[in-house]
Image (cartoon, rainbow, N blue to C red):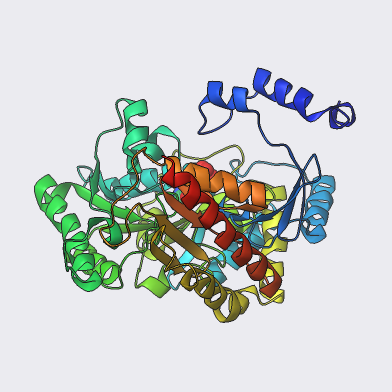
């Protein structure tokens, strides 16, 4: 069937796709009319369409293909493991060698105080696990009324009902209708969007953190279980908190004795130049959720790193935790993760991000700061963004709710580069492997696309 399909024309493939495939986060009627792009191959930093158009992938797939495409080591690890043991569960007092080895490796790579991992397949599942673990912990500690989790506006924690309720996307809440109770949302630490006139990043960061303390007081401190946050809000538009923010959040969490969950689904495994993003931002979490780049997206795998506070309760209070997924600790996914981590380690990708990738991205962004369309540029490691505005001096936005962002994104695609539009913010998350040649290629396209977008925006 696949061979037959591959000989079909683009129009035939698009028609079949439109007839049977419901895409995530899509207006199905509009997409069916416009037609999907068919991606057939990936090699290093590039992907290729079925019409052999080469595109530089500035999003690492969906914030995940950190080592780039086409690495045979990962395919070979999957092939070998599938032949040896393609599946066995980890429920029945059973385990497998890849999951043992991976758990020990993750304990070695994660910040101090993390010795245990609970696995799932997606980022959403890992956050559901974390929510259940947090509530189970407080029940074990004799405080079952602590069920409230405080999150931030613009947070993205996934698409399951629990993860979407914990996330701070109002449009998603409307469609979930109603979202689950006991998830409260506070100010996003987004200085460009929410600071008052003349408010410094330092002062704004502290004010954003204070909104958490205010919410704790409003809900009642005895009811609050945890604070959750992405070190950098990714899908919400790469919103990077001021340096004062996370240390102040930690002070508040410690003051009230509540747990901290760091959602590192995007920031883990090299994106920030470190294995995890939390330590570099002053976050000392009790749980870390991860997914995506643990396998560089080659195969689904996610998990929760469980810190010693919760692990101690699990081991010492000795009660069964009724939770798990068929694919928790899947041997093939774990074998691929081990191969992926080995590539990141042996090819020195973390120092490459710190010493080369991050300054190169900063240079690219600095080069467009003065363009009339650009309101702000920002980056943290290889997570970057620029905001498109109508008037950069007054920070006036374009009308049309993200229309200019979509125009810009489509120009990028036509010019052979993928960046993601979140409203009128263009987000980027290139694979860790970008060299000077890729930054040069991206820089030339970015300048061209900004001019094309400006010309179109003037017509709006
Ligand atoms: C920070 C964060 N958490 C959770 C998720 C959900 O992951 P998944 O799509 O694998 O369920 C995402 C996805 O982009 C994410 O960015």
Q: Nearer the viewer, residue 132 or 262?
A: 262
Camera sees residue 126: no
Q: Nearer the viewer, residue 358 or 138?
A: 358
Q: Nearer the viewer, residue 190 or 323?
A: 190
Residue at image coords 45%, 69%? 380
Residue 445, quarter of picture: bottom right
Would you say 336 lies left or right of 374 here?
right
Q: Position of residue 381 (x, y in %)?
A: 50, 70
Would you say 384 lies left or right of 171 here?
right
Q: Nearer the viewer, residue 200 or 271?
A: 200
Residue at image coords 72%, 49%? 332
Q: Quadrant of the C terminus?
A: top left
* On screen, residue 291 above or below 256: above
Q: Position of residue 404 (x, y in %)?
A: 44, 44
* On screen, residue 457 above or below 365: above
Residue furthest out toward the top: 19
Residue at image coords 31%, 37%? 170
Q: Quadrant of the N terminus?
A: top right
Camera sees residue 327: yes
Q: Position of residue 410 (x, y in %)?
A: 57, 44
Would you say 173 lies left or right of 269 here?
left
Residue furthest out toward the bottom: 355
Residue at image coords 32%, 59%? 260
């Amino acid at each position: 069937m696949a061979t037959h399909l591959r000989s079909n024309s683009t129009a035939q493939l698009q028609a079949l796709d439109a007839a049977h495939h419901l895409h995530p986060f899509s207006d199905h009627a509009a997409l069916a009319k416009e037609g999907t792009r068919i991606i057939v191959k990936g090699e290093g930093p590039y992907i290729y369409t079925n019409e052999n158009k080469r595109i530089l992938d500035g999003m690492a797939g969906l914030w995940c293909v950190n080592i780039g495409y086409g690495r045979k080591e990962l395919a070979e690890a999957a092939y070998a493991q599938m032949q040896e043991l393609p599946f066995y569960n980890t429920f029945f007092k059973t385990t497998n060698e890849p999951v043992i080895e991976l758990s020990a490796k993750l304990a070695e790579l994660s910040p101090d105080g993390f010795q245990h991992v609970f696995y799932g397949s997606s980022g959403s599942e890992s956050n559901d696990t974390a929510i259940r673990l947090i509530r189970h912990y407080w029940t074990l500690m004799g405080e079952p009324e602590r069920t409230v989790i405080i999150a931030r506006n613009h947070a993205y924690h996934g698409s399951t009902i629990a993860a979407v309720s914990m996330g701070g996307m109002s449009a998603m809440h409307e469609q979930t209708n109603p979202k689950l109770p006991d998830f409260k949302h506070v100010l996003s630490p987004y200085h460009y969007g929410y600071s008052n006139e003349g408010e410094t990043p330092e002062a704004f960061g502290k004010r954003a953190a204070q909104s958490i303390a205010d919410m704790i007081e409003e809900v009642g401190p005895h009811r609050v279980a945890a604070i959750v946050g992405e070190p950098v809000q990714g899908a919400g538009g790469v919103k990077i908190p001021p340096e004062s923010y996370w240390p102040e959040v930690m002070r508040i969490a410690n003051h009230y004795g509540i747990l901290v969950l760091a959602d590192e689904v995007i920031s883990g495994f090299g994106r920030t130049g470190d294995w995890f993003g939390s330590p570099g931002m002053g976050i000392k979490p009790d749980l870390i959720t991860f997914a995506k780049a643990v396998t560089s997206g080659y195969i689904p795998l996610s998990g929760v790193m469980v810190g010693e506070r919760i692990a101690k309760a699990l081991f010492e209070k000795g009660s069964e935790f009724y939770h798990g997924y068929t694919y928790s600790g899947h041997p093939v996914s774990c074998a691929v993760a081990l191969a992926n981590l080995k590539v990141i380690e042996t090819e020195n990708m973390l120092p490459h991000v710190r010493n080369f990738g991050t300054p190169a991205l900063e240079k690219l962004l600095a080069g467009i700061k003065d363009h009339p369309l650009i309101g702000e540029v920002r980056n943290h490691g290889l997570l970057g963004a620029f905001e498109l505005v109508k008037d950069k001096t007054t920070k006036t936005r374009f009308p049309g709710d993200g229309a200019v962002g979509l125009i810009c994104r489509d120009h990028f695609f036509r010019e052979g580069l993928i960046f993601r539009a979140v409203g009128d913010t263009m987000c980027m998350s290139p694979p860790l492997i970008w060299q000077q040649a890729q930054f040069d290629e991206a820089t030339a396209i970015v300048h061209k696309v900004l001019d094309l977008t400006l010309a179109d925006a003037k017509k709006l």
